[in-house]
Amino acid sequence: MNILIINANPDKNSFCAAIAESYKEGADTSDSNVNLIHLIDLEFDPILRYGYKKRMELEPDLLKVQEQITKTDHIVLVFPTWWSTFPALLKGFIDRVILPHFAFKYKKGSPLPEKFLKGKSARLITTMDGPSIYYKWYMRSPGLRSIKKGVFEFCGIKPVKTTIFSSLKSTDNAKREKILENVRMMGEMLK
């Protein structure tokens, strides 16, 4: 199995980075081929400067990521929830990588696209300082729902499972270590 872990927190010393590393540690115990990318390490323009009117050439790092996505069976996306969604770096990455004719193609006469990323699964792991109940029930999980439904499932990735680690602002080191151990176990079980 090929697993691609993407850490979308621009701070490489963040708890998201630790989560991504913990998942990788767990997944490395299997016979899987595991790759971890920190988006902050990639060199690319995160702005889709012409929308979809004019093609922007992809930088070498983005071409490499597209190749990895093509070969992967399972994507693990780790990101912080900021202002109820996700960092601008992740939005720019999605805009530049998940492109028509790579991830999907519109079909003439149909509102539904041809999905090019079928056969892949995903796990979305997000962190937040606030309580998850507020995010889920009052805000209706906008960041998770956007990526799950509007990006991954739109392109054929299913199932997409989600994990929220909330109220981290008031979490002590013992609780954080327990979270990292749970994430390692997720990686071992390839969930």
Image (spheres, helix red, strand yellow):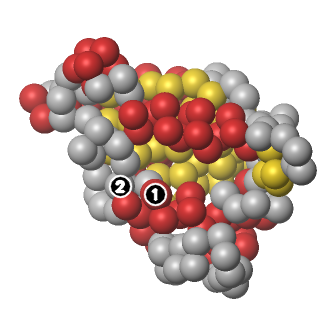
Res 151 visible:
yes
Q: How many marks?
A: 2
Image quarter (top left, top right, bottom left or bottom right) of the N terminus: top right
Q: Nearer the viewer, residue 29 or 169?
A: 169
Q: In terms of secondary structure, where does tag 2 sit?
A: loop
Left or right position of 84 against 69: left
Question: Alpha-carbon distance for marks 2 and 1?
Answer: 6 Å
Q: Considering only vertical position in the picture, is 36 above or below 54?
A: above
Left or right position of 28 against 19: right
Mark number displayed over residue 90: 1
Q: Considering only vertical position in the picture, is 55 above or below 29?
A: below
Left or right position of 160 against 178: right
Residue 147: give x, y in percent of width and height. Answer: 53, 40
Q: Amino acid at mark 2?
A: Pro
Residue at the spot 67% in from the left edge and 76% down from the top edge: 53
Mark number displayed over residue 87: 2
Residue at the spot 72% in from the left edge and 71% down from the top edge: 64
Residue at the spot 65% in from the left edge and 70% down from the top edge: 52
Q: Amino acid at mark 1?
A: Leu
